[in-house]
Structures are given as structure tokens and as C-alpha cells.
Image (tube, rainbow, N blue to C red):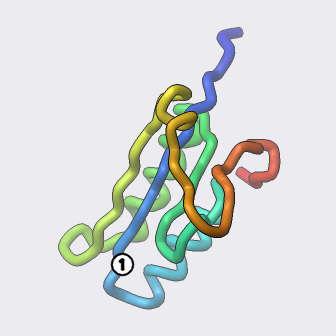
Amino acid sequence: MPIKRIMFYIISYDIADDKRRVEVAKTLEGFGSRVQYSVFECLLTQDQFDVLMRRLSALIDQTTDSLRSYRLCNACVDEIVLKGRGEVTQDEDVYVY
């Protein structure tokens, strides 16, 4: 059985409708950590990421909403600069899939 590689993702959104915005946030809370109001950090396998994107795609309105995901390599994660409160997400075992 191949080992599933966990990658670091930053996912952000700009959702026009309050109800859709809440649903998107609730979905993301099941996969990662909210680090700013509309920004989440997620540690996911490719399969988990695919499931998340399918769920989010079903929630958003493609004509009015925006959803962005950025996958970071380990070297890039090590270069994250954080000022002020908070910390970079590190523990993938805290999420409910």
C-alpha cells in the first residue's frame, strides 16, 4: 500500500452570500484550522484535498464567489513568516474528515 503524502494547503474564500459563506467555513473547519476570517490552513492528502474541493465547489456560486487554494512544499512551509498572534498549523491529527 503506497504511503499517502500529506501536503500543506492555504485555502481562502470571498463569498458574497452569508448562508453560503457559513457553509463554506463549516466545511473547511472539518478539514483544517481557521487562521484568519476567510483563510484556512489544512494538512491533507491528495484524496482529502479532492474531497474538500468537490464539497466546496458544490457550495459556491461560480459567478459571484471566489475560492483559492495554494499547496505549499515543506521548504515553503518552513519559510512562512508570521507576525502577531497565531501559529502555523502543524498537527494533522486534530481534524475530522
**In the displayed structure, would residue 68 be above or below residue 17?**
above
- Compared to residue 65, the image places residue 5 above or below, namely above
Would you call the spot at circle 1 few (<14 residues within 10 Å), some (14-19), or many (20 or more)?
some
Residue 5 location, quadrant:
top right
Q: Residue at x 22, y 77 (%)?
A: 64
Residue sitting at 28 percent across and 73 percent down? 65
Q: Is residue 55 left or right of residue 60?
A: right
Viewer-nearest residue: 81 or 25: 81
In the displayed structure, 46 sits above or below 82; it is above
* Residue under the image location 65 percent in, 60 percent down: 33
User: 3 or 83: nearer the eye?
Assistant: 83
Residue position for label 1: 15
Residue 68 spot, x, y in % from top left: 35, 56
Picture coordinates of residue 21 (x, y %)? 46, 80
In this orientation, which residue lies closer to the viewer: 34 or 79? 79
Examine the image and state in which quarter residue 18 appears. Answer: bottom left
Residue at x 76%, y 54% (from the top left corner)? 96
Please say if 27 is above or below 64: above
Would you say residue 33 is visible in this rendering? Answer: yes
Mark 1: which amino acid?
Ile
Determine the image quadrant of residue 83: bottom right
Which quadrant is the N terminus positioned in?
top right
* Total marks placed: 1
> Residue 69, image x and y in percent?
39, 50
Residue 76 appears left or right of 63: right
| In-image side of 69 versus 76 (left or right) | left
Decide if residue 30 is in sight here. no
- The residue at the far front in this view is 83
Extreme residue toward the right, this view = 94
Classify mark 1: helix, strand or loop.
Answer: loop
As drawn, which residue projects farthest toward the bottom?
A: 18
